[in-house]
Amino acid sequence: MESPPENVSKPVVPPDTAESRTLQFDFTWRKFKGLISEVNDPEAKPLYIVSWHAFKRPQMRFKSPTTAAAPAAAVTTTDDDDDEDAAYMGSGTFHNFSINADYEVRGRSGTLTAQKRFKTVYTYPSYAFSDTDQAVTMTWTSSSGFKTWDFVCMDEQQMPVARFSANVWGLKKLGLIDFMGPHAMSDAVRDEIVVTGLTLFYCMVLRSSSITSFFAAAFSQPSR
């Protein structure tokens, strides 16, 4: 089986930025769902609810209790969820014979494309970080330690804009999502980072635990 890929070079995240925000990712075993909320107000209503469907695509589904109702076409993809007060926000889809992962954020689809076979370097087209109507290319990398598995998102200038620090040994508190830089307070950026970051995290978990994913990586043709 494939061991957790490491990044090419560990990104340095600035300790102090003009703007920042942090979300916490908790898991509820009773409902088998993930809850994402503001770290400074953990008792508040979750910003996102994440559910898993191992045998049905998309495998990851994101709902937002604080948003208006989603278009009917989008809601039909999550009609088996029981979060009546939550609106569909996005999804993550994994493939048995590909190390890429597909995602959707508020009706806009994209692909997390692997740039390396055995190292965590993924790119995706971002509209939330773009100042025009054209997408910009964002890059996710990772580094792992004994307690945490860090995923860092960088812009086209290779400056860190977000980080998901997964708690390797956590059973309920699964990690923190940090946002930094001029887009840190953008709700569109928050949506995009939550979906792409968690989709990539579980993609890498699958790659690390599946012999099928190992051979998919071995015979893949990473994007140039």
Image (cartoon, grey):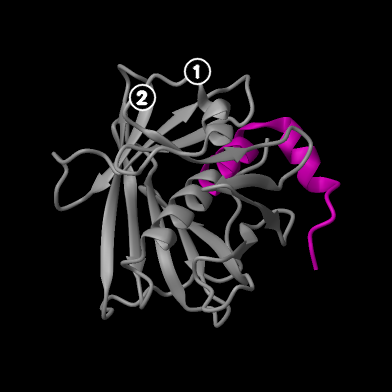
Name the residue beneath numbered marker 2. 83
Towards the viewer: 170 or 61: 61
Q: The N terminus is located in which quarter?
A: top right
- Residue 119 drawn at (x, y percent): 65, 57
| Mark 1 crowd level (few <14, some 14–19, many ≥20, 10 Å Cα) | few
CA gap, disc 2 to disc 1? Answer: 9 Å
What's the residue type where badge 2 is placed? Asp
Towards the viewer: 100 or 46: 46
Q: Are marks 2 and 1 in contact (CB under 8 Å)?
A: no
Name the residue beneath numbered marker 1. 80
Q: The C terminus is located in which quarter?
A: bottom right
> Quick check: is 2 in the magenta stretch?
no
Mark 2 secondary-structure assignment: loop
| Mark 2 crowd level (few <14, some 14–19, many ≥20, 10 Å Cα) | some
Residue range highlighted in magenta? 200-224
Towards the viewer: 98 or 3: 98
